[in-house]
Amino acid sequence: MKNYLIPQSIAERVLVVGPKHINYEGGIGYLINVYSRYFEAFKYVTTHRLAKNKAALIVYFLGQYSEFLTKLTKDRQIKIVHMHASSYGSFYRKLVLFLTSKYLFGQKVLYHMNGSEFAIFYEQSNPVQKRLIRFLVENVDVVVCLSKSWADFFRQHFRTKRLEVLHNIVENKAPQTPAKHKKPDEPLKVLFLGAIGARKGVFDLLDAIRQNREQVQGRLQLVIGGNGETEQLEHYLKEHQLEEIVSFEGWVTGDHKARLLADCHLFVLPSYSEGVPIAILEAMSYGLPILSTPVGGTAEVVLEGLNGYLVQPGDKVALFDRLMKFQQDPTLLAQMGRASRRISQNYQPDAVLPQLLRIYESILR
């Protein structure tokens, strides 16, 4: 019998809203997908999915908003609206849902901030937009963020009614095998999973490899999985003749992703902004050391010198130096990989969801 971490007596009183969580294409979708399997009753309204243009997004949202109204009107058990939020368009969608939930239906609202660029979004907004952001953040019943560093940001900029830190979540589906050992003559197999674009730093990683081609030839293999600016990526690889060193797998899920995580030695994500990346947590659960940047909550899961290294965003020299450190010292891979797997236990459902249950119970009281 399945051990539901959010029992029906609580779960039936919560309506969760956020992006598409079935056949998801992003970290928030993954998070909600995991949640859905541990709620004994999972009530959900999708508010966002990938679309060709903004007009299509608006039409989709209006249809889903109608479903949202119907659920709150008909389902009198619902007492909490749990909104998984991000920045930019996501904020304005959630603003509509917040106003509806709190002031039309009298619901308690939990605002779960997953967005990696929320600080940039707030700081670059005009005065009117900032007032709207402050209005929402300061009037929801609970703001949930992913790390202590994000909690510090909210404390510095807002007067929240209640602020909670709740770890991001990862389901450990990795085989419990011994840490991988790289043979001395074997190339270092490096994995990048994430959105293809400037924010995740993938082109910094490629530049670091291109600028040191002679040193990495035959000694390093980079595997990239993701969506986004894929045409630009493929053009870059062809233009700089990196196809022998770098392979692009496209968007990877399921068994394909599991195989890549199991086959590679090191996970790299040189991002410019993050919440707490699901991709890093997944890689840690597979016993991979991490090479990343100290942005958002990353430095709270990647501990310098323990389960990986952190370099400043855009520092391609330091990024390449750390890559070579792993290549030249295979013992680091096994040692840091074991630490990663150990740390990842703090982000498993049975470690995270009991805290969410306590938050729900306290709101209902």
Image (cartoon, helix red, strand yellow):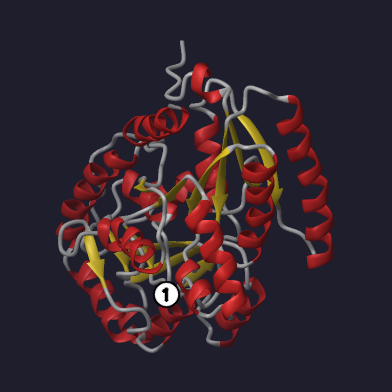
Q: Is residue 46 above or below residue 274?
A: above
Name the residue located 35 percent from the left edge and 70 percent from the top edge.
220
Name the residue located 44 percent from the left edge and 32 percent from the top edge.
360
Q: In this view, does 267 lie above or below 177?
A: below
Q: Which of 91 and 55 is in front in this view?
A: 91
Q: Which of 19 and 111 is in front in this view?
A: 111
Instruction: Pinpoint residue 199: horizontal percent, then vertical percent.
Output: 49, 74
Amino acid type, label 1: Tyr
Q: In this view, does 236 lie above or below 113?
A: below
Of the 4 image quadrants, the one containing the C terminus is top left
Name the residue located 68 percent from the left edge and 56 percent from the top edge.
93
Name the residue located 78 percent from the left edge and 34 percent from the top edge.
70
Q: Nearer the viewer, residue 137 or 61?
A: 137
* Camera sees residue 225: no
Q: Nearer the viewer, residue 31 or 98?
A: 98
Could you tell whether 327 is left or right of 32 in the image? left
Instruction: Pinpoint residue 139: horizontal percent, then vertical percent.
Output: 51, 53
Instruction: Pinpoint residue 217: horizontal percent, then vertical percent.
Output: 37, 78
Could you tell whether 150 is left or right of 45 in the image? left
Q: Is residue 2 above or below residue 49?
A: above
Count of numbered labels shown in the rendering: 1
Secondary structure at badge 1 equals loop
Q: Name the residue under label 1.
A: 272
Instruction: Pinpoint residue 87: horizontal percent, then vertical percent.
Output: 56, 64
